[in-house]
């Protein structure tokens, strides 16, 4: 058919898997024809009004929708099992969160106890150190106990090889 500057050609119907390609226009315009040319399309308003706005579904589409709507027992069992597993995972997660919170509170409590004991220990150490008079200790050691400072020949230096202390197994020369 030819109308004005454009040519309308009938196209044979093809299966859904196949596609027609046209060098000049869209494939399958209006479902039956494609347009060859460069003029504006003329829309048939009467035909558009007469066409059914809700096209009938194919048999395969109806079957697919029916399958999608139906829930067989195997699917329901699988869905229920997935729901139970999800619920158990959620409960175990919440239990672990509660245990974690309790442990964090216990750690915080122990840290505060440790800090209090360290503070008390430091205060007691300072009290003991300040109560000792080192001059009095020196006088008692020298006058009452007969202790003296070491002379030059009495001091022996020993090399320590990696240890913090030296073990003495025999008399030193």
Image (spheres, helix red, strand yellow):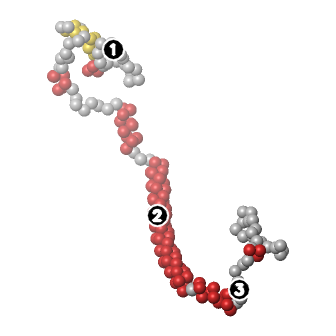
* Residue 105 drawn at (x, y percent): 46, 71
* Residue 146 drawn at (x, y percent): 71, 88
> Splitting the image into 4 quarters, where does residue 156 fall?
bottom right
Give the answer, above or below, for where 11 lies relative to 117.
above
Q: Whole-Å distance between the Cαs marked 2 and 1? A: 64 Å
For the residues labelled 2 and 1, say whether their Cβ atoms are less than 8 Å apart: no
Q: Whole-Å distance between the Cαs marked 3 and 1? A: 118 Å
Q: Earlier in the sequence, mark 3 or mark 1?
A: 1
Give the answer, above or below, for where 153 lies relative to 34.
below
* Residue 113 drawn at (x, y percent): 49, 76
> Splitting the image into 4 quarters, where does residue 140 fall?
bottom right
Give the answer, above or below, for where 38 lies relative to 118.
above
Which is more toward the observer, 136 or 24? 136
Nearer the observer, disc 3 or disc 2?
3
Q: Tell me how many marks there are.
A: 3
Q: Whole-Å distance between the Cαs marked 3 and 2? A: 66 Å
For the residues labelled 3 and 2, say whether their Cβ atoms are less than 8 Å apart: no
Q: Is residue 95 visible?
A: no
Q: Earlier in the sequence, mark 3 or mark 2?
A: 2
Residue beneath disc 1 = 22
Would residue 54 be found to the left or right of residue 66 on screen? left
Residue beneath disc 2 = 97
- Name the residue: 36% across, 34% down: 61
- Name the residue: 19% across, 15% down: 40
The C terminus, quarter of image: bottom right
Which is more toward the observer, 89 or 156? 156
> What crowding class fits label 2: few (fewer than 14 Cα within 10 Å), some (14-19), or many (20 or more)?
few
Which is more toward the observer, 42 or 25? 25
The disc placed on residue 147 is 3
The N terminus, quarter of image: top left
Which is more toward the observer, 14 or 133? 133
């Amino acid at each position: 058919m030819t109308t004005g500057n454009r040519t309308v050609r009938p196209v044979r119907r093809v299966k859904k898997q196949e596609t027609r390609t046209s060098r000049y226009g869209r494939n399958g315009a209006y479902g039956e024809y494609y347009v060859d040319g460069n003029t504006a399309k003329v829309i048939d308003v009467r035909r558009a009004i007469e066409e059914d706005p809700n096209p009938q579904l194919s048999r395969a589409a109806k079957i697919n929708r029916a399958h999608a709507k139906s829930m067989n027992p195997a699917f329901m069992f699988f869905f229920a099992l997935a729901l139970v597993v999800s619920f158990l995972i959620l409960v175990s997660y919440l239990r672990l969160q509660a245990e974690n919170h309790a442990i964090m509170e216990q750690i915080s409590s122990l840290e505060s106890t440790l800090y209090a004991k360290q503070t008390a220990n430091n205060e007691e150490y300072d009290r003991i150190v300040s109560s000792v008079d080192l001059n009095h200790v020196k006088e008692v050691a020298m006058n009452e106990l007969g202790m003296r400072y070491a002379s030059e020949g009495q001091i022996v230096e020993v090399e320590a090889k990696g240890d913090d202390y030296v073990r003495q197994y025999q008399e030193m020369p």
